[in-house]
Structure formats: C-alpha cells, structure tokens
Amino acid sequence: MSKTGKYTKDCKMQNANCKLQIEERLLGSREPSLVSAQASSNLQFAILFVLFFSLSSLRAQAAQPDRPEAPLVGRQEPFCGAIGSGRFKVSTTATPTELQAGDPIHFTIRIESVGLWQRAPERPDLLRKLEYAQFRENFHVANDAERLSPQQGIWEFDFLLRPKNERVREIPSLFIVYFRPGLTPPEKGYMTTSAPAIALQVKARAKVEVNEIQGKIEPAQPPDRLYQIVTGPQVLQRENGSFPNGWLLLLLVVVTPIVSIGWFAWYTRRNPDAVRRRRLQKNRAGRQALQALHSLHAAEPSEAARRVAGIIAGYLRHRFNLDDALQPAALGANHGTDKLSSDQRTRLAELLENCDSVRYAPPPAPSHQRLTSEATELILDWESQP
Amino acid sequence: MIASFVSLVMLSLVVSQDGQSESDQQILDRAQIAFQLGAKLRGTPEESKHFQLAADYYEELCRGGVQNPALFLNLGNAYLLAGDIPEAILAYRRGLHLNPNNLEMRANLAYARDQVVYSSPDSFVRPSESLWPPWLPRWTRSMSLGAIFLFYVISWIGLAHRWAFRPGSWPWLPGIGAAGVLCFVVIFLFQMRAEKKEAEYPLVVISADQTYLHKGNHSLYPRAYETALNRGAEARLVQIRGDWLQIELAGDQVGWVLRKKAIVDLP
C-alpha cells in the first residue's frame, strides 16, 4: 500500500468516529440509565416553565382590576378616566361667591365613588379640554392642590378661578364622564354626571387711587430735561416757517450776475494789457508763436535769428491762411501779406532783414534779444486786430 | 414752600391785572411762573394742574400768532408733564416742523411716544422709525435754498474768472456751480412736494383711549380693524365729513374716527 492510500483510509476512519460521537451527543447515550436521567431533567424544565407562565398570568389577572381600560371607540368627553361597576358622583364648591373681578375663587371638584371602582378619576382638565371652554372664557384658571382618598372613594381637586370681568354671573355646571364596564356594546358604559352651576356676584374692580398704593412702587419719573423750559425773547418770535421774501430771492439772483459783469468791466478798464493778452490767448497760432519766442532766450544768436524768422513765417501762414511754401523772404517781399497794414509790412520786412543780418553776421554775432521782443510786439499788434 | 408761596403770590398778582390788553410778554411770564411752580411741586399730584395752566398760557400765545420752536418745546413739555400726551406730541411735531434739527425736542417727542399704549405688539399705528442718523443734521428747505444760492454764486465767479483771465484757468468752476445748482434745485423740489403733501394731509393725534376705526363715517358702520387706538396714536387726516374724520395710519390703514376723539393740526 502506498503512503498516500494509507493516509486516506485513516481520514475516513476518523470521520466515521466523529459522526458517531455527534449522534450520541444529540440522541443521548443508548444506555437505559442515562436515557431516564435526561428525561427527568427535561420534565423538571417543563414544569418550571409552566409554573412561571402560570404565575405571570395569575399576577396579570390580579393586576388587571387596577388598570382597566375604557374602550376608545365611542368614548365620550369630558372623560375623567374613572372606571367602576358602581357609579360616581360629582359636586363642586366655591369660596367666596361675592368678589371683585380678578379676585381668586377657590373652586373644588369632589368626585365620590358609590360602589366598586376599578380606576380612580383624574383631575378634570379645565385648562385644555374643549368641553370646559366656558370656564376659560369667563375665568383665568389655575390648578391648585388635590386630596386623594382611594380607600374612601373620594377624590378632591382644587382650582383657582379669577373672573375676567364683572359680567361673570356664575361658575358653569361641571360635567364629567366615567366608564362602567360590563355593558354591551362597551361604549354604552360611558356615563355622565354633573354638578350644578354656582352663582357668583362679581363687582367691577375699584379704581386704585395713587394714595392707596401700598409698598415701594417707584413710578416712572419723567426725565429732568422735561422740567426745563426756554426763556427769553426767542420764545416770542413769530416764525411762520415759510421761505425768505420772494423779492429778496429775486434780488439775489439778479445781483450776482450784475456784480460779476461789473467786476469784469472794471477789471478790463484797469488792466487793458491783460485784456489784450486774454484775447491773444484765444488765438492758438499767436499763443504758440509767443511760447516759441519765449523759449529762445538760451539759443545761439544765429540759430535764434533763424528760428524767429521761421516762427513769424509760421504764424503768418496760420493767421492768414497763406501758402505753406511761402518763405520768410517772400513774406518780406509783400507776397500775400495784403491783410497787413503798410506799417506792419514795413516792420515785418525790417524784422526779417534784422534776422538775416544777425544770422549771417561774422562772429561775434550780435544779441538776438531785440529780435524776439520785436517779433513779440509784432504778433501782439496783429492779434489785437479784430 | 416759601418759594412756592412767593411764586403763587406773583402769579396771583399777574392774574389780577384783568381787563387790560395783555402783551405777549405778560402771558409768557404767567406761563413761566406756572411752569416753575409745577416744577417745584414735582412728584406731587398738584404739579399737573400748574403744568396744565402753563400749557394754557402757551396755547394763548400760539393763538396770538407767536410761533417758534422754543415756544412749542415749552408747550410740549408742559402738556407732557400735565399728562396730556396727545397735545404734547402735537406741540413737538409743530416745533419740529419749524426746526427739524432741535435734538431736545426730538428726544422729548420720542419720550412722549414711549408713553403711548399700543394695543397691538406689531407695527400697527406705530410711527415708522426714522432711518436718518440722529447725529446728522436734517436737510431743510432753507439749507437747500442756501446751497442753491451758493452754487449759483460759484458759477458766476467761475464765468467772470473765465472772461477776465485766460480760458484755461479754472474751467471746472462754472460747471461745478451749474451742477450744484441743478442738484439742489431737484432736492428742493422734492422737499416742496413733501411739504405740500404734509399740508394737504395734516397731522391727527388720537385723544381718547380705546378708539376704533370704522369703515364709514357713522358708528353703525363696522369696525375697520379690531385693534383699538389709544391716546397719542398718530395719523394723517384724509378728509372731514361732519363730525367724522377719515384718517390714514402709518401702515396705510384707513378708517373713520369721531372728531371729538382726535386733535387735528389745522391752522
């Protein structure tokens, strides 16, 4: 036999032994003494189980009279929770019955069991139940103490009622509903009992005078600033809250431009040069020419003379819309300068000659300051023309 | 006590000058004496009588044509200390109409409004809260007029400067002046419109507690609202028909009240 075949045979034997052991555990030993012992233990367990459930059911049956349930179907309101094979009586008392509106009334509801009862009544819910809305309409209701005597079958519930006004005439009749089991159908067991209304005499609340207030109640004091008044002639001023006089407004509207124009006229009379300069500033060509002349003070005399001639030529071209190709020499030769007066033409010619003389003079060259001032004067003359 | 006695004697002396046409100054003196007497009796039940007397004298001055914020402040204080909240509110509102920047009067008006019992916890009847910061002066029509004139002058100065000097100097000045004039003219027109509306719908102050608005000008008409108005509630007058006033509350609720249950700010 090979080694592998022996190993397989051993495994099969082990499996068979295991199965046998499991069967023995499950079914018990096949020996008669062991079987009888197992059966007795099972019987004991069953007896204990039956005893436990019997006791539980007995206990439940014993407790059932304390917690009987009224059927929900067909329940009538205001159900107070009382259940009994006998009947329940309800009565009410109130003290005092003569009072002012707002004063408290000690109102007691007494529920008494006549005969056997299974479940005690609960406090009638005057605060929430719809059937007791009449209480809440006429009174401020608050729960108070309660006295329970189940052995005597008496339950008393106290309330504090405060009439809302003097029109309240009575504490309304109080109804409660309890349940009597054993009737068929069960909802027939709901019984209603009531206590009569209690007449009241409610007076209007007396007005409390200031001197009747007891205790230290500090009234709200007005602030000190209310006790201060304005004095002096300002109290007698007559203001109507309207605008200033219309004529005054008109005067202000007219005076302002008159003052502005008057000041301008005075200024032009006092400063004619300034006015000329202002007019000159309107002419863009003249302004640019003057600025260019002003910038020549640091230039070389020959270069300055050349530029003065060019500035004058450029100004005249822009001022009188002359041909751009027209050279300064041609301007001096009276080409296209008929809009100038004879004096201006002469001055222009002289200025251009002087420019040439300064430009081509042997060194040291004469100063060009006179040229720029003459050119400035010439431009100002032309600009002052209308 | 001695001071009270002396004041009372002075008051009686002033009052005894009967039959003469009293000047405004004499009436003012009486009012001030009555007020000071009430202030001396502060905390006693008698104080309100003197404050009411002072208020009567101040009212007499008002009827005589004297109108200024100081007088309305005194009148409001006297009414408030006499317990007449509606008249106090009306006096303060009149004074604030003349000078909206009187902070003391505004504070007293707020105190008077705090004394009003509102039947509803919501915003029914309550005057709307002003969003204007209390530290910022309120812009009045006079201020608008002054600003218009200021910018008008600025624009003319700018023009004169432009004429006299070179065109490039201060070119923005006339523009700013014109823009300012335009802006404040618009503001002024809005203020005039509000003023006109205020004049068309004068102030009404409820003077009786538990006053209900009705849907018509008769008590047989049903109530317009189940919330009652109490003394000091403010509204605007829409129209008068017989003994009934149609008023509009701050929340745009409209209804009718008996004329005797309200005071109207009519000239």
Image (spheres, grey):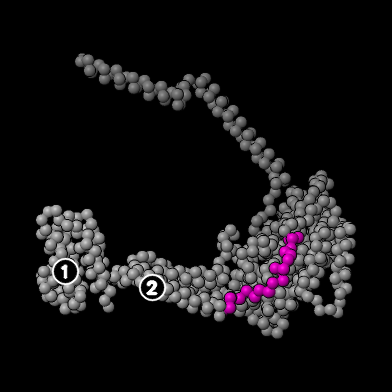
Q: Label 2 crowding class (10 Å Cα cut-off): few <14, some 14-19, many 20+?
A: some
Q: Is residue A77 above or below residue A279?
A: above
Q: Position of residue A46 (x, y in %)?
A: 58, 31
**Which residue: 77% across, 71% down?**
B25
Horizontal side, residue A239 vs residue A166: left or right: left
How much space separates mark 1 and mark 2, taking CA atoms? Answer: 33 Å
| Residue B145 visible in the shown view | yes
Q: Position of residue A253 (x, y in %)?
A: 49, 77
Question: Which quarter of the figure is the C terminus of chain A placed in?
Answer: bottom left
Q: Residue at x 78, y 51 (%)?
A: A144
Compared across the picture, whether B156 is left or right of A346 comes to right
Q: Quadrant of residue A98?
A: bottom right
- Tag nearer the camera, 1 or 2: 1
Q: Say which quadrant the N terminus of chain A sits in.
A: top left
Mark 1 chain? A
Is residue A241 on the magenta stretch? yes
Q: Which mark is residue A268?
A: 2
In terms of secondary structure, where does tag 2 sit?
Answer: helix
Q: Which residues are magenta?
A: A226-246
Mark 2: which amino acid? Thr
On screen, residue A340 versus residue A226, left or right, reads left
The residue marked by circle 2 belongs to what chain?
A: A
| Residue A350 marker | 1
Which of the two residues, A188 or B106, is positioned nearer the viewer here?
B106
Sooner in the amino-acid sequence: mark 1 or mark 2? 2
* Disc 1 residue type (three-letter): Glu
SS assignment at label 1: helix
